[in-house]
Amino acid sequence: MRYITLIVFLCFLSPSLHAQWEWRHPSPQGNDLWNVHFAPGSSTGWAVGAAGVIIKSTDSGSSWSNQESHREDIFRGVYALSAYSAYVVGDNGVVLHTSTGGLTWQKQNSSTTAGINTVHAVNSSFAAFVGDAGLLHTTSNGGATWTPRSTGTSNNLNGVFFTSTQNGVAVGSGTTIVQTTNGGVSWTARQVFPGQFSSDLIDVFFVDASYGWAVGTGGGVIRSTDGGTTWSRMTNNGTSADLNKVRFSDRQNGYAAGESGAIYRSTNGGAYWSTVTSGTSYGLEGLALQGASTVAVGLYGVILRSVNNNGFSMVTSGTRSSINAVTAAIPSTAWAVTSDGEVLASTNGGISWQLRAQPVMQPLYGIDNINGQTLLACGNGGLVLRSTNGGYNWSSIASGTSVALNAVDMLDSDTGYIVGSTGRIIKTTNGGAGWYPVASGTLESLLGVHFTDSDHGTIVGTNGKVLSTTNGGYTWSHQQSWTQDALFHVIRDGNRGMLCGDDGTLSCTTDGGQHWTDCPGGTTAALFHLTHPAPNEYAAVGEDGTIMRTSNFGQTWVREISHAQHTLYSADAHGGNVYVVGDYGTVLRNGTYPYPVTLRAFTASEIDGCVQLHWLVEDEQALLGYAIERLDATGWEEIGFVKSSSSLRTASAEYQWRDCLVATAGTAWRLRMVDMDGSTEYSPELRLVGTAEPGDWKLEAWPRPSHGNVTLLLPDGVAELDVYDMSGRLLRAFSISEMNDARMQLSGSLFPSTGSYLLVARNTNHITSIILQVMK
């Protein structure tokens, strides 16, 4: 039996398998975008940004679609070689490459964990990237290996451009300019002449072998006419904005873009620059010229486009106001409210959102619905609004208070509650048409409320306040405080319930809220809201795009890849969809929650000249089956289908499939798991990578379990070692230069707490991993 590859994942692979969160508003993006590039002579290009965001355009920037990177690093650079091939680089030494037009992105071994700021390619073989502290690496084999180069500077390098495989220039902080004429083997420092020039340089661009420009802080612009050997300062006509990117279409015509939405245009080689109205005050970080189109991208998902130099228009659409709350109704309707008093609505399961109304200009903090018909919203200054026609028209309802009202919970029986500052509780029994006060017995700010029926409910607030009632709020019991953290939201499901709060607080109850116990999710991020899409399934959302998920009522949690950099404030689930909203107009959607299946193992081995696929699954939930797909030179093709062993949830099941087509190097297999409603998710890919037996290439560690330092025995030819926690977070990536010996020691300080950690070793032909138990 010949061993092909083994993907070991268990809890580790859950985030990547289940990263089904879709960005839905603003469209196409609201995360910071740091760079954009189009393939030469093509209308296809990519833009990249924070939280692992990759978006693609096939029409010169007129429209964009999101692609899955399976990472949440900040991506700062992108270079498109063709409509199918591109590089992406970013923080933590990440280099990704696609040869499938972005359908899949493969991580390359960059040989660094430092931040990478940009990448430039000359052809499919030769490319270079630059980064912090003088970092510069080149490749001559399409990224199979990246070679560190000594640039002679410790300043951060921000831009790089090669006019050929031999001639290149890199620029950076402290007016750094270095030039190579031998493919990056050696570099020579260059200076700007004549006169004083003190800008930190951020970008460099050459239109041909001779003419190039560099831009930087304070509106600094310089030009070279001899391939980067000498540089002259260009007048900036009083421009003081930091310039982040410069691009020219020929020796005369070009653009520069930078902070506060600054765009400048030159028609005489940079000697004079005229101001162009951009229509935004957000910083612009990326710039691309493609045929008649000029595309600029920047902070908060800004995408601008100009055609034939006729002014810029905004491609990105949607509010940038903070979205504070969301409510959903079956089958596919949802509403959300913002800090600018806007009401957004979706009628297609969260796929698209439109401004439904703006009844006030004050912040709205809460919204809920009764049977998808009546809507109630609350906000600043005691504001209560009511709509009976799906949010098109709103009336103001007397609340009897002027304090901030933070959350609302409506029941189908027309009973509802609103909570707010200084212990305020108001109640309705007529669908929100009238409200009266309820005594809470506290002056703490109350932030979250949830009732299981008209009698039983729980309220949470600042300084660990938890209130519980069994008689519709006539009397409230104050739970013994076990925390001083602010508690933001609570969900009750009969006697069971869960609450969340500051510093990653997550607590559970099984007795109707009489007692609460910690069910920690392994995060310190503030968690602002919970949703409960299915039995035992909960999701908590919070700071920095955090989404924590549990499928076993809080016993274990997984941090999911949200691809959101901003704080998330609210979540709701209905009709198979989960909606999450947050800062700067963020709306995420998950249409496969709970997931149709949990994949626990996926392996391949060769038997009698055939490839035997084997997979182990758990928790099949109304799953139709598994489509087996093969990748070869023509792309992915479905080669078989295996029906699910049960249409109901099963504890576990095993499946096999044999592919007897003669496989070649590069052949890959994957599973497309199909739910009864047609939704799908993909397994990782298995590739034909070598002929080693299972026991020949393995990673060993001792002692196991560990109470301190860990000694590793590395397999021959290992090129990279990654250490993950069981939420899928990369704790440390060791490069080949750090693994000089077969035996390697890891410091116990690498493991922050007691628990399980995944160690993955790999090279171009093999991958192996072990799970290490650490006791602190």
Image: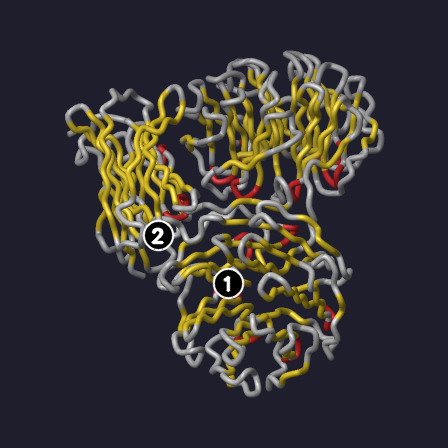
* Image coordinates for residue 231, horizontal then vertical, percent: 71, 20
- The location of residue 455, given as percent across then percent down, is 52, 81
Relative image position of residue 633 (x, y in whole percent): 38, 19
Of 159 and 662, which appears nearest the observer? 662
> What is the quadrant of the N terminus in the image?
top left
Identify the residue shown where x is 34% and y is 49%. Answer: 598
Residue 172 visible? The answer is: yes
11 or 325: nearer the viewer: 325
**On screen, 322 above or below 83?**
below
Question: Do callouts 1 and 2 mark residues in contact (Cβ within 8 Å)?
Answer: no
For label 1, the crowd category at 10 Å Cα-Cα, with few meaning under 14, some 14 to 19 and many 20 or more, is many
Q: Is residue 268 left or right of residue 602?
A: right
The amino acid type found where label 2 is placed reads Gln
The amino acid pointed to by label 1 is Leu
In this rendering, is residue 206 above or below 18?
A: above
Q: Which quadrant, please, contains the C terminus?
A: bottom left
Q: Which mark is residue 586?
A: none
Q: Dot 2 surroundings within 10 Å: few (below 14), some, or many (20 or more)?
A: some
- Mark 1 or mark 2, whichever is nearer to me: 2
Which quadrant of the view contains residue 342? bottom right
| Residue 132 visible in image | no
Q: Is 140 rendered above or below residue 375?
A: above
Residue 186, image x, y percentages: 51, 19
Which badge, 1 or 2, comes first in the chain's sequence? 1
Q: Which residue position is annotated with label 2?
A: 621
Disc on res. 530 = 1
3D distance between C-alphas at marks 1 and 2: 22 Å
Q: Could you say which is closer to the camera, residue 503 or residue 557?
A: 557
